[in-house]
Structure formats: structure tokens, C-alpha cells
Amino acid sequence: MASRFRHAALVGKYQAPGSRSVLESVAEFLAEQGLEVSLDAATALAAGITAYPALEADAIGAQCDLAVVVGGDGTMLATARALSRHGLPLVGINQGRLGFMTDIALADLRETLAPMIAGDYEEEHRTMLEGHVKRPAGDGHHVIYESFAVNDVVVSRGASAGMVELRVEVQEQFVANFRADGLIIASPTGSTAYSLSAGGPLLHPGIAGWVMVPIAPHTLSNRPIVLPDTSEVRIEIVAGRDASVNFDHQSLASLLHGDRICVRRSEHRVRVLHPRGWSYYATLRRKLHWNTGVGSDEHFY
């Protein structure tokens, strides 16, 4: 069993009604377990909690050995992007609606989180995407935007515009020109998000791959394709108005013809801690409401 944690950073979804009391309750519980407790600075300011030190992301990475995230998957994604470069493990407490990554129910907090704090947990590593946007200039292309994503990078048409045309290359090899509402490059983590709703497959987190999914393509034979995550994907805006690119909902709007979006695997990974006995397949059954069938909990021998 791993050694117990010493100093926890608490990060929360502070916009929801009653969030302050929830955050204060979680902080008190962590302190009861013998942990030093600090709050993410933005969380502390927005929630009006002053009883604990408030730390920025770099200070959390330097001083803490655990981040406890209270909220939904959006809060977890933002925290993962901010802290992944520090290698800090994350525990997600679900205060949202779906919760693929925040898998501890708030009602089960005490009985589930206490053993994890003591070192009894399962750990998995999730790959991340990173990328940038290059714009043509007189002497070549210049980077005008760069970011990270845990779920996906999405290039899409403007809200009031028609389709976009996108030229796609993988490892400098031409794939196709897609005419569609957009294109999704999703990690295995992101395969259960926008990619799934656009018709993409589910990818197990242990698969070293991305899924590339056209959004409402003009040609029905343009189907999702799974790519090795060692590939660099390049997407060029060929035609269409008001196109944008989103890295986990961090948006750069008003892309121009000739802009190139380059996406590759990040050197950083997200460390996610789960309760002992956690199962990816059980999460899919629960969150996607799959019918388990008679005797489905029994093992085959």
C-alpha cells in the first residue's frame, strides 16, 4: 500500500448553490484525517473561504501531494490542465451530473476517501493532447495560440455559417479534405464526451490512440478513425467562415483560411486516483445506463 498523503489542495466548483458549505465540509473532513489543507486560490476567493491558505497552481504543485477536486468533469478537466505538469495526483468528488472522471459520490465521501488518504487506492494515468495554431505570415507561419486538452481538440464552423472545409494530414501524410460542421480529435478520456455524441467509438484509457471524428460530414463515407497517439495531426482551414478551435472548451474563434491547427500527445499525463475496486466498465455501465442483464455481476469460470 502506498504511503499516506500529507498536504491536500482543495479545488471546487464554486458557482453551484450550496458549494461553499460543501467545500467547507470537505476541507474539515480532510483536516480531521490529519492532512494539512490548502485551497486553490480561485476557489477560495469565489467561495469566500478564508480559514485555509490559498495557493496558486504552481504553489499547489510545489507544496501539496494531493489535489481533491469537488465538482463535475469540467472542474476536473480544468484542474488536470493546470496541475498535470506538476505530476500531482487528483481525486474527483462528483458534485456534477455525469461524472466520468469524478467518481466518488459526495454522499460516500467519508467511507471512500478515508482509505485513499491512508494510501489504499488504485492509480491510472491519462494521456493529454497539446497543440497550437499557426497563421500564415510574410515569412512563414507564426504560432498565435497554444494550449492543452484532456478530452479533445475540436475545430468547428461558426454558429451562423455553413460547413467548413478542412485539409487533414497525419504524420505529414495527406488523409482527406473534409467538408463538415467540424472535426474532433479526442483522447481515450474524451471518447466518452463530444466524440461519443458525434458517433465516435469508446476508447479504453489504456489504448495509446486518438479518435478523429468528423462532425456531420457532407460525405457519409467520412467515418471516425482511430489513430496512434504518436501521430501529429495537422488541420488546415481551407474554406468556411467564423471557424473556431476549442481545447477542452478553451476557444480561439475567427480562424482564417490557411490557419493550421497541429495536435500531438503531450509529455504530461494526468494522474487520477480511484477507490480500491474501481472498474472502468462499471463506470460505463453506470454512466451510460447500459442494461446489465440477469446474472451479469457473476464472473465466468
Image (spheres, grey):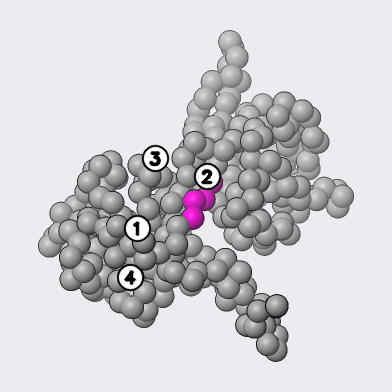
Considering the whole magenta stretch, tell me its main secondary structure. Answer: strand
Which image quarter is the C terminus in? bottom right
Label 2 belongs to which residue? 128
Label 1 belongs to which residue? 2
Relative image position of residue 275 (x, y in whole percent): 42, 68
In depth, the one of 177 and 256 nearer the eye is 177
Q: Few, some or many C-alpha atoms within 10 Å of disc 1 (few <14, some 14-19, many ≥20)?
A: few
* Relative to 184, 42 lies left or right: left
In front: label 4 or label 1: 1
Query: Is label 2 in contact with label 1 (beta carbons under 8 Å)?
Result: no
Magenta span contains residue 297: no
In front: label 3 or label 1: 1
Q: Few, some or many C-alpha atoms within 10 Å of disc 2 (few <14, some 14-19, many ≥20)?
A: many
Dot label at residue 115: 4
Measured Cα–Cα span from mark 3 to mark 1: 22 Å
Measured Cα–Cα span from mark 2 to mark 3: 11 Å
* Relative to 277, 280 lies left or right: right
In front: label 4 or label 3: 4
Q: Quick check: 66 above or below 134?
A: below
Which image quarter is the N terminus in? bottom left
Query: Is label 3 in contact with label 1 (beta carbons under 8 Å)?
Result: no
The furthest residue to the left: 51
Label 3 amino acid? Arg
Q: Which residues are magenta?
A: 124-128
Measured Cα–Cα span from mark 2 to mark 1: 25 Å
Query: Is label 2 in contact with label 4 (beta carbons under 8 Å)?
Result: no
Q: Secondary structure at mark 4?
A: helix
* Relative to 49, 68 lies left or right: right
Label 3 belongs to which residue? 85
